[in-house]
Image (cartoon, rainbow, N blue to C red):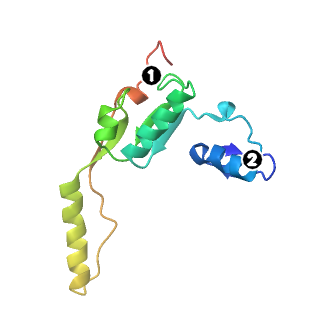
């Protein structure tokens, strides 16, 4: 995220430069605002963030660690591979169907229902003594 000097608005870096150019705003240099870690909603978003960071010369994971809230081909095949949460779709689907059937039957649905997930640690979030 960065801050527009003219309006003190916080915007996401990915869209910030285009918006600033279209509106004629001057954007503060974002290098000082690069976070230690980024969590993206999808693997596709994480792959895009990785491309953007790499293009700016930001080392992943040396400077910024990266992860996605859902595992995908994008996360598994990126270089470095992106850490991700692996959701257990069958378990989650069965829990959802139980809640839905209860609602259809006019019964109260007990929730929230917690299901399991696994965090797949990959190269994008592994800092070693040499890259910490």
Left or right of residue 59, residue 5 in this image = right
Along the polypeptide, which appears first: circle 1 or circle 2? 2
Q: How many marks?
A: 2
Residue 72 position, x and y percent, is 30, 43
> Local crowd at mark 2 within 10 Å, few (<14), some, or many (≥20)?
some
Left or right of residue 17, residue 79 in this image = left
SS label for mark 1: loop
Q: Quadrant of the N terminus?
A: top right
Residue 110: assigned label = none
Which picture quadrant has residue 100? bottom left
Q: Residue at x 55, y 26 (%)?
A: 58
Q: Residue at x 72, y 45 (%)?
A: 3
Depth check, front residue: 25 or 40: 25
Depth check, front residue: 88 or 114: 88
Q: Which residue is mark 2?
A: 4
> Local crowd at mark 1 within 10 Å, few (<14), some, or many (≥20)?
some
Image vertical order of residue 108 relative to residue 94, above or below: below
Residue 127: assigned label = 1
Which picture quadrant has residue 57? top right
Image vertical order of residue 29 relative to residue 20, above or below: above
Q: Label 1 vs label 2: CA separation?
A: 32 Å
Depth check, front residue: 2 or 107: 2
Residue 62 position, x and y percent, is 50, 22
């Amino acid at each position: 995220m960065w801050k527009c000097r003219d309006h003190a608005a916080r915007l996401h870096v990915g869209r910030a430069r285009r918006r600033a150019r279209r509106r004629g705003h001057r954007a503060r240099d974002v290098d000082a605002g690069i976070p230690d870690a980024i969590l993206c909603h999808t693997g596709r978003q994480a792959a895009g963030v990785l491309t953007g960071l790499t293009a700016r010369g930001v080392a992943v994971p040396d400077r910024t660690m990266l992860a996605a809230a859902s595992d995908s081909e994008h996360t598994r095949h990126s270089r470095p591979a992106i850490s991700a949460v692996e959701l257990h779709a069958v378990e989650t689907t069965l829990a959802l169907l139980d809640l839905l059937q209860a609602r259809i039957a006019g019964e109260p649905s007990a929730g929230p229902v917690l299901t399991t997930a696994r965090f797949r640690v990959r190269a994008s979030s592994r800092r070693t003594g040499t890259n910490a």
